[in-house]
Image (cartoon, rainbow, N blue to C red):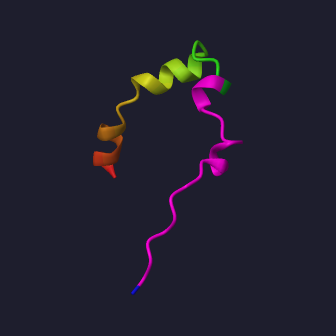
Amino acid sequence: MLQKNPTSSGQDELFRSRLDSILDLRHALVKLSRLIDRDGLAADL
């Protein structure tokens, strides 16, 4: 019988930063990304 994976100790998250803490949320491209209709784009594929 296969054993379950051990639960994460959180050590892998030590060096992972959240993008919202790295990016300037007032930047024009960040604002533009909020306006893009991603569902509409996916439907066109």
Q: Is residue 30 above or below residue 44?
A: above
Q: Which residue occupies the foreground of this view, 32 or 15?
A: 15
User: In terms of image quadrants, where is residue 29?
Assistant: top right
**How many numbered badges does the structure rendering display?**
0
Q: Position of residue 15 (x, y in %)?
A: 71, 42
Q: Which residue occupies the foreground of this view, 20 or 30?
A: 20
Q: Is residue 20 above or below residue 5?
A: above
Q: Where does the N terminus fall, quadrant-wise? A: bottom left
Relative to 31, 17 lies left or right: right
**In magenta stretch: residue 24:** no
Please name the residue shown 33% across and 46% down the image: 42
Q: Position of residue 21 (x, y in %)?
A: 63, 24
Q: Which residue occupies the foreground of this view, 22 or 36?
A: 22
Please name the residue shown 49% across and 68% down the image: 5
Q: Position of residue 34 (x, y in %)?
A: 43, 24
Q: Position of residue 11 (x, y in %)?
A: 66, 49
The magenta span reads: 2-21
User: In terms of image quadrants, where is residue 19?
Assistant: top right
Magenta segment, prevailing SS (helix, strand or loop): loop
Please name the residue shown 66% across and 41% down the image: 16
User: In terms of image quadrants, where is residue 35?
Assistant: top left
